[in-house]
Amino acid sequence: MKATITRNQSTKKQTLGDMSVTDDNGEIIFSCKTLEPPWKYNRPNVSCIPTGTYNVTRKDSGKFKDYFHIMDVPNRTYILIHPGNYYTQIKGCVLVGGGFSDINSDGYLDVTNSRNTMNKLLELMPDIFELTIEEV
């Protein structure tokens, strides 16, 4: 199984994208929305990570319970895929959700149904998989 994040739109505060998961035959078996920080030259805590292909491993911690860790990001550590709704909840990581909506009325799109979307990914994905991040 492989996952691909296609970044579609970026503002000064956030980057919106689509994630698709494909099986070994290349068929899309799951899709969701993603929310990341904007591109700020890969600076820790404020930037999305560079486009490219990464290995991802499943992890568990007290803060996020089950989540995915994007490995070997150049000059970065602890880049996670985890639940959350708002751009203010990410410091370089990727939030997943079922759709986009301005939940908190701040003028920026948030991801919706994040915990359920993350649970579906956790059920579906193996403990180690490949993630490609690309721009439109």
Image (tube, grey):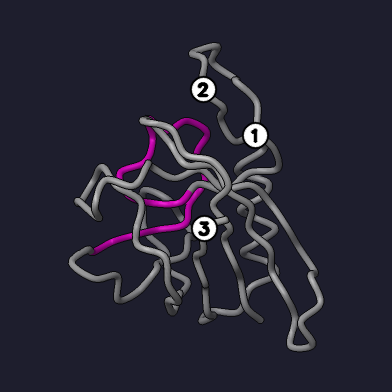
Local secondary structure at mark 1: strand
Name the kind of residue labelled 2 in the image.
Tyr
Name the kind of residue labelled 1 in the image.
Thr
Task: Name the residue at 24% across, 52% down.
Answer: 41
Task: Name the residue at 58% across, 58% down.
Answer: 6
Q: Is residue 91 left or right of residue 70?
A: left
Give the extent of the magenta segment.
77-94
Quadrant in which residue 21 is drawn: bottom right
- For the residues labelled 2 and 1, the Cα–Cα distance comes to 13 Å
Q: Which mark is residue 135?
A: 3
Name the kind of residue labelled 3 in the image.
Glu
Q: Which mark is residue 112?
A: 1
In depth, the one of 124 and 35 nearer the eye is 35
| Vertical arrangement, residue 124 with respect to residue 46, above or below | below
| Mark with earlier residue (1, 3) | 1
Crowding near the residue tagged with mark 1, few <14, some 14–19, many ≥20 C-alpha atoms within 10 Å: many
Extreme residue toward the bottom, this view:
24
In depth, the one of 9 and 70 nearer the eye is 9
Which residue matches tag 2?
Answer: 108
